Image (cartoon, helix red, strand yellow):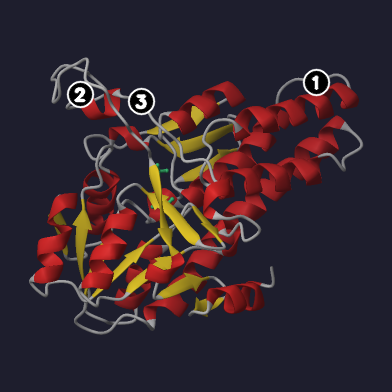
Amino acid sequence: MRTIFWDYDASAIALIEQTLLPDEFKIIRCKTIEELADAIKRLAVRGAPALEAAGAYGIALAAHQDFKDVEKMKSYLKKASEFLASTRPTAVNLFYGIERVLNVALKGNTIEEIKKLALEEAEKIADEDVNRNKLMGSFGAKLLEDGDTILTYCNTGRLATVDWGTALGVIRSAIEEGKNIKVIACETRPLNQGSRLTVWELIQDKIDVTLITDSMAGIVMQRGMVDKVIVGADRIVRDAVFNKIGTYTIAILAKEHGIPFFVAAPKTTFDWGKDMGDVIIEERSRDELIWCNIKCKKTLIAPKDVKVYNPAFDATPLKYVTALVTDKGVIFPPYDENVPRTLKI
Ligand code: MRU
């Protein structure tokens, strides 16, 4: 089942409500762009490639509201694209999905044509995501050997994409090829995408997974329990990989222990015209750090009035990255030459 899809009966975006996992599996439907924006901000839908599809379907959803006038419709679509783009600042895929569908939709001449063009383009983006993940998986699987134990971070699986996954997709593909692969999943504080989502996905697929806290990454490497690290990305710029907060720490630990550190991401995650300093790192609510469960806010795990700093992502300089696994192939350093050549950007 796809993480996000268009519900043709309801003219709505259907998505897996990820904040409830692993307690409850539920599909929610967004009928307005306001509902979708809320789902994105709450991380009901999350992960860079899933956000690309969410942005794309978001413009299709905007086009499915009631209109009587083509010019008013087009101006609403432009406003909707700015509104949806303002939900989360770091993953570049969100902007890519929105812009691509908006540009196609604006070429329509009638209300019906615009609706059709927008939805067709969004569906194309969702299908492309699944196909490119499988491609990335087959390229990346060559880096993993039979018997490897792979440490991963955050959630880069089906739930972070339309299906299959990026870094987790590489692991899935290697296993599908018959390799015996074990996974160590970091819990990924503060929102626990690792323990809640990655572990849930891997257990469903009967893949051998061991959960550790983020602070245990050092000991498992020091004790020789990790052969390789593979993570995803929210944006890759000329000098760094932006990914879930804590990725940078893992990359340095991997370097110190001589463990290969791979990053898997599609071409649409690259923003090669930019540098580390150009990217906004999302800062999230203090509630994520002070409550044991932010959904019910019953048990404090820190004094309520403590000062909090809660950046959701960090930047790992490319010098720590052994190879970039993309849907166009595996890219090794020097990245300043090989990334533009392989990705044609
Ligand atoms: O805040 P999130 O859960 O959207 O962050 C997601 C990540 O950082 C993932 O590791 C990244 O998007 C790669 S997903 C294929």
- Mark 1 or mark 3: whose residue is earlier in sequence: 1
Q: Which mark's residue is nearer the viewer, 1 or 3?
A: 3
x 24%, y 84%: residue:
146
Please indicate whether residue 313 sits to the left or right of residue 223 in the image.
right
**Mark 2 lies on residue:** 291
Residue 150 to residue 61: above or below: below
Quadrant position of residue 206: bottom left
Mark nearer the N terminus (3 vs 2): 3
SS at mark 3? loop
Q: Is residue 5 above or below residue 81?
A: below
Q: Identify the mark nearer the N-term, 1 or 2.
A: 1
Q: What percent of the width, then of the height, locates residue 325? A: 46, 72
With respect to residue 184, does 61 lie above or below? above
Which three-letter amino acid code belongs to the residue tagged 3?
Ser
Report the disc number at residue 285. Answer: 3
Tell me whether circle 1 and circle 2 mark residues in contact (CB < 8 Å).
Answer: no
Circle 1 residue: 67
Q: Position of residue 148 (x, y in %)?
A: 21, 78
Q: Amino acid at mark 2?
A: Trp
Q: Secondary structure at mark 2?
A: loop
* Distance in Å between CA atoms under marks 3 and 2: 11 Å
* x and y, in percent, of residue 109 in the image: 92, 37
Q: Would you call the spot at circle 3 few (<14 residues within 10 Å), some (14-19), or many (20 or more)? A: some
